[in-house]
Image: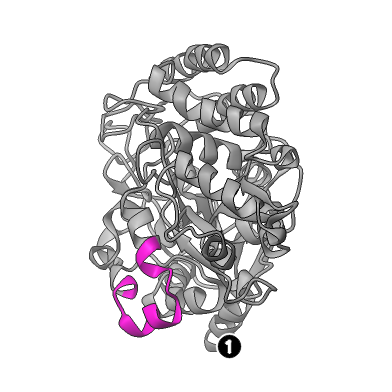
Amino acid sequence: MRPYDVRSGDPVKTRSTRAIPSAAVLTVGGLLLTACGSSGDGGSGQAGPASFEGRGPISYVAAKDTTGTIQPLIDRWNKQHPDEKVTFIQLPTDADAQRQQMIQNAETKSDAYTVLSLDVVWTSEFAAHQWIDRLPEKQFPLGRMLEPVVETAKYRDGLYAVPHSSDGGMLYYRTDLLKKAGVKAPPKTWAEMKDACAKVQKLPEGKGVGCYAGQFQKYEGLTVNFSEAVHSAGGVVTGPDGKPDVDTPEAKQGLDFLVGSLKDGTIPKKAVTYLEEDGRQAFQNGKLVFLRNWPYVYSHAQKSDVRGKFAVAPLPGLNGPGSSSLGGHNLAVSSFAKNKATALDFIKFMTSEQSTETLLKEASLAPPYASLYDDQQLIDQYPYLPVLKESIVRAVPRPRVVPYGDVTASIQREAYAALTGSKSSADALKALQADLQKSVAQ
């Protein structure tokens, strides 16, 4: 889920939105799925590339840009294209609220929104409902981008969006505290992380410092963190056949890690309310030894009191390095927009290697281009790039389904029930399995 802006915005305690029912469902692993039909597709249920005609003013719709990096890019475009100016429409920082507003715009067939910045897990849903246009794939340098990132922009082998930023979760840790506690390397397992925390907390400097936090409020961030815990314990949310398979011993071990960590204090009690920004601020203020968060945190932490006192590592797992959920944003064209020729050119501008490198340098946003992760000059400046690349390449996507709102709402509800103690892990997973089976069977 990241969204550059989603993960760097002010915390908004918005609950997940009501899902839009759908008769179509996409499964992972490239399985065929039914979708809304369209004219010109020969009855295959997949639209052909749209006709991108018309030039003039357009809008760019994304989460609130608290990084201050998007408007300067738009200003550069507007200076070069005075007759095709772009207006930046900023939505709430919460991903669920963004999705709700974009769907509302689409359902009214409004032309107010032109270029949409979609969370990577929304591409299938928006494409299946014909809310976004299929794009001319050959016009974009997809071969130079990381393959897992490109796959998030496709639906039934058609390109419906273009990668703008990617994302992989990383473990931020206090190098100064670990060194003083005699911990020589960042933890690779959950047990090693707990052991390192115990040593740090025995130090005078470690008194009152919490061990670990992620994003555990009932919103999209919880879906991400729950999925990572399940995958990092060897489980799956959906199997290779695309079917839910979450009521398993492996998934229970993942959820038990989160639940048990809240009970034993590894995760501070207040972290059950955390969004991305809450955790970032806690880490920067010296209240955490470890933090699971996205790369945008790096540039903020470099400007804080922990500058020079932290580093990043892959997420830990049950028996070794864990798996991140794959995040990021893709840019798409609303099916109901005007001036689509301008929209297509603007997407090319925003997703160019130059623009995404600018966002890397100024906001620590993960670029889609593979070459930027191997540039030694960039690595010298941004030491986390090799860890981030590993996180993205090894990441496991959240369920790529058309009724994603239903799926993520179920995950959030049941995982939160387990975290807050109103259900056991076993009961929560059993209920979640039943809910997900109903959603994908629609």
Is residue 422 on the magenta stretch? no
Q: Residue 72: x, y in percent?
A: 61, 81
Q: Relative to residue 100, is residue 314 depicted above or below?
A: below
Query: Mark 1: few, some, or many residues within 10 Å (few <14, many ≥20)?
Result: few
Q: Which residues are magenta?
A: 372-387
Tell me which residue sits at (61%, 56%) in the image: 7
Q: Nearer the viewer, residue 86 or 304?
A: 304
Numbered marks: total = 1
Is residue 380 on the magenta stretch? yes
Q: In the shown orientation, is residue 342 left or right of residue 423?
A: left
Which image quarter: residue 113? bottom right
Q: Nearer the viewer, residue 327 or 270?
A: 270
**Image color mode:** one colour
Q: In the shown orientation, is residue 281 left or right of residue 49?
A: right
Q: Relative to residue 103, is residue 168 depicted above or below?
A: below
Q: Residue 97: x, y in percent?
A: 68, 44
Residue 257 visible: yes
Identified by mark 1, the residue type is: Lys
Q: Residue 415: x, y in percent?
A: 59, 26
Tell me which residue sits at (55%, 31%) in the image: 408
Helix, strand or loop at disc 1? helix
Q: Look at mark 1 in the image and give the residue it sits on.
A: 79
Tell me which residue sits at (62%, 70%) in the image: 301
Q: Residue 191: x, y in percent?
A: 47, 39
Q: In the shown orientation, is residue 48 left or right of residue 414?
A: left
Tell me which residue sits at (46%, 48%) in the image: 120
